[in-house]
């Protein structure tokens, strides 16, 4: 009987203890989640709030090709913010934020030089820290009617003048300089009139261009609502970097430039390298690596002094070096590679360094990017032969 009572007492004790532990563990889990959320908030944000104001503009690049001859109304797509949006208190939308968009209207090119266009709506953003932000944004490649009419008028005058010049030359070639002198220039005038009529006819039947927006093209999305957003700390937006003992690399300037063929695909860095490591390095060991892990070696079209220079232990080198890349708006890291293993010794973030670049350089870069985008779809040579 005593053994039986002892056994019941032990079972009761264990049962009550397990319930108590279950309660403790459940409560602890809830507290832990709240604690880490609060900690994350403190690490990311300053605690202040700014507003993404109505009529603000966000610069983005699309993640896929949008073509007015292929895409239809209702097609969804994603874009990536290429320039951080900041208020007076700090950054509220970081570079790399993803935007969800939808095509709401398209128009094929028409006669009289009227180009096609695409109109898009944006409904939400997804920040790098996983927050979903509802917005109302619009972007259209459609020109203002007055600006479009002015552009078409200039182009048509160009066609007419070109036709007149060609007609005049034809008259001169067919009738000769003597006929032109004998008729006091009327043959040339008549030829120019005929050529002008031909040019005007070309203008009347000329169609505008189709629209093509490709990854790397910068689009500017206008915001239609006011959205309150927390302000990020500077430390929350820093990209991860890899350092090698004794090797110090400082990037003081980053310029966006065109290559000799007119393509805006070159990043020119002003760097200072202090090598107090155990490695002998060369500019040929350098490369830019983007967030897709693609590698880009120094360009021969830029300053090549650092590219072909040996950087021995104890050396300090300063200068410029250029890299031709596929998309200047991607995230990049400047890396030195070990010759034997082929592994990266260090990776220095260009995004981190860009924070220290002068406002003057940033404005020039932004202006150059806006100039390069015309969204014109070039005619395929095979289509032109049909």
Image (spheres, rainbow, N blue to C red):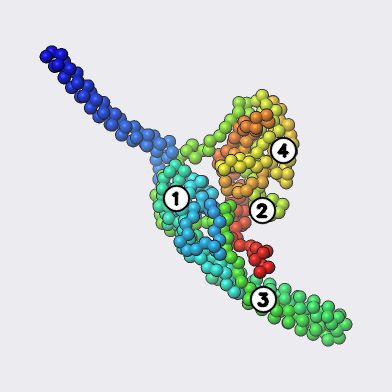
Relative to residue 317, is residue 225 depicted above or below?
below
Q: Earlier in the sequence, mark 1 or mark 2?
A: 1
Q: Is residue 138 left or right of residue 243?
A: left
Residue 185: quarter of image: bottom right
Disc 4 to disc 1, C-alpha distance:
40 Å
Disc number for residue 307:
4
What is the CA distance from the residue labelled 3 to the residue labelled 1?
Answer: 46 Å
Q: Residues within 10 Å of mark 1 (few under 14, many from 20)?
A: many
Q: Are marks 4 and 3 in contact (CB under 8 Å)?
A: no
How much space separates mark 4 and mark 3, taking CA atoms? 52 Å
The earlier-in-sequence mark between 2 and 4 is: 2
The residue at the point 57 percent across, 56 percent down is 214
> Taking 120 as reference, is 248 above or below it?
above
Say which label, 4 or 1, has the lower sequence index.
1
Name the residue beneath numbered marker 2: 263
Residue 316 circle label:
none
C-alpha gap between disc 2 and disc 3: 30 Å
As helix, strand or loop, the secondary structure at mark 4 comes to loop
Q: Which mark is residue 125?
A: 1
């Amino acid at each position: 009987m005593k053994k039986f009572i002892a056994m019941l007492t032990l079972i009761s004790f264990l049962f009550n203890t397990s319930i108590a532990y279950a309660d403790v563990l459940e409560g602890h889990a809830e507290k832990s989640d709240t604690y880490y959320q609060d900690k994350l908030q403190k690490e990311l944000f300053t605690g202040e709030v700014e507003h993404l104001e109505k009529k603000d503009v966000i610069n983005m690049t699309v993640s896929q090709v949008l073509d007015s001859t292929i895409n239809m109304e209702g097609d969804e797509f994603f874009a990536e913010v290429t320039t951080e949006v900041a208020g007076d208190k700090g950054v509220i939308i970081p570079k790399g934020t993803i935007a969800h968009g939808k095509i709401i209207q398209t128009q094929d090119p028409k006669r009289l030089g009227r180009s096609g266009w695409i109109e898009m709506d944006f409904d939400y953003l997804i920040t790098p820290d996983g927050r979903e932000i509802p917005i109302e944004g619009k972007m259209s490649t459609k020109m203002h009617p007055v600006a479009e009419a002015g552009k078409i008028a200039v182009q048509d005058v160009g066609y007419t003048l070109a036709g007149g010049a060609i007609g005049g030359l034809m008259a001169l070639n067919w009738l000769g300089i003597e006929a032109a002198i004998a008729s006091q220039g009327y043959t040339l005038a008549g030829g120019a009139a005929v050529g002008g009529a031909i040019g005007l006819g070309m203008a009347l039947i000329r169609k505008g261009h189709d629209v093509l927006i490709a990854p790397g093209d910068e689009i500017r999305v206008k915001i239609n609502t006011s959205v309150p957003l927390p302000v990020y700390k500077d430390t929350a937006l820093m990209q991860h970097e890899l350092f090698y003992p004794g090797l110090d690399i400082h990037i003081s300037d980053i310029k966006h430039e065109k290559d000799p063929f007119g393509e805006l695909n070159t990043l020119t860095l002003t760097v200072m390298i202090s090598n107090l490591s155990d490695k002998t390095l060369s500019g040929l060991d350098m490369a830019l690596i983007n967030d897709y892990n693609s590698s880009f070696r120094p360009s021969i079209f830029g300053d090549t002094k650092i590219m072909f220079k040996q950087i021995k232990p104890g050396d300090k080198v300063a200068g410029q070096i250029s890299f031709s890349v596929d998309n200047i708006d991607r995230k990049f890291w400047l890396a030195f590679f070990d010759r034997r293993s082929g592994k990266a010794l260090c990776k220095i973030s260009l995004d981190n360094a860009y924070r220290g670049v002068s406002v003057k350089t940033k404005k020039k870069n932004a202006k150059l990017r806006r100039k390069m985008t015309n969204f014109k779809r070039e005619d395929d040579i095979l289509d032109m032969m049909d």
